[in-house]
Amino acid sequence: MLFAWLTYSIYHQLVNRDNLQISLEHMGDSLRRKGWAGVALVFILMFFNWGLEARKWQKLVRLLEDVSFFKAFSAILSGVSLSINTPNRIGEYGGRILYLKNENKLKAIAATIVGSFSQLIITIIFGLIGLLYYVNNFPPSSESIFLDPGFWHKLLLSVLIVICALTVLLYFRLQIILWVFDKVPFLRKAKVYIEIIVQYPPSELRYLLLLSAFRYIVFSAQYLILLDALGMEFMWWQGFLLNSVIYLVMAGVPTIAIAELGVRGKVSIFFLGLLSTNTMAIIAATVGIWLINLVLPAFFGSVLLLGVKIFKEK
């Protein structure tokens, strides 16, 4: 229902634009003029995107068992295929652990969460930088006699800075989580499955953050390249900063993959619409990235799942 409503809302917004036909012609002309090199580059970068995630996961589960890069990459794609219809893609964990030995499956979930934690920190950091740019350069157009709308932006920025600081602190003090599991009675039995999180030294946690930052730059570049290929004119650094706000918003919105397309479309129009009136290019790029970075890997992952034995041993 959410997907249907958002899709209709975006469709209604597009068909009522005066320059829709001009935008379509401009988009087609841009593709013809620049060729499909940009689209091909975005496709190639998809393998770097998920390859970096596979390297992170390979590094994380190394304490449990040695996994080849190809096996880690297969696990990542299988996780994507199982995440399509689960809230906030939690199905990824189930898809990945199928490639491990039975005794390591549950422990690997905790290891995978550490990797997701590192990616979240990078998303928040870049998102804060982008939000700071947005607040200072795009002040609210409406004024309130009770409260300046800019106040809410600054309040949100302050809250996110505190959250970011606490998140980074927790990331480098993962033993706090283990302490909580030890103190809460109904969590105590599960403690054995998360003990792996305190075995990563600070140097390894920093390395995971570095890989997460590289991955963030890759999938941000994919979106900007596709926007450029579809004819949207913008300064790349402005697009990067506002795009990081989009990722920050998406990180905080509970959704499933199919509804995520509509949510991302609305959020992208709101922020990138500040740089260009070419709404059609924004929507086309959003759909293109969704297909290349999620649907296509999910298809490959579903094929790979056919060869996986869920229970390898008794």
Image (spheres, helix red, strand yellow):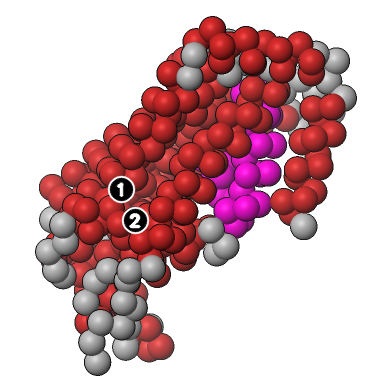
Q: CA distance from mark 2 to mark 1?
A: 7 Å
Residue at the spot 55% in from the left edge and 21% down from the top edge: 227
Label 1: state its secondary structure.
helix
Looking at the rendered structure, the secondary structure element under dot 2 is: helix
Q: Residue at image x 71%, y 12%?
A: 25
Q: Residue at label 1? A: 53
Reply yes or no: does residue 263 show up in magenta: yes
Q: For the point 64% across and 22% down, which residue is it?
A: 281
Is there a contact, CB below 8 Å, between mark 2 and mark 1? yes
* Numbered badge on residue 76: 2
Where is residue 85? Give x, y as percent: 57, 62
Q: Is residue 78 left or right of residue 280?
A: left
Q: Is residue 207 above or below residue 76?
A: above
In this view, the residue in front, 200 or 298, is: 298
> In the figure, is residue 102 to the left or right of 144?
left
Amino acid bearing label 1: Glu
Give x and y (percent) for residue 197: 23, 65
Residue 152: within the magenta? no
Quadrant (top left, top right, bottom left, bottom right) of the C terminus: bottom left
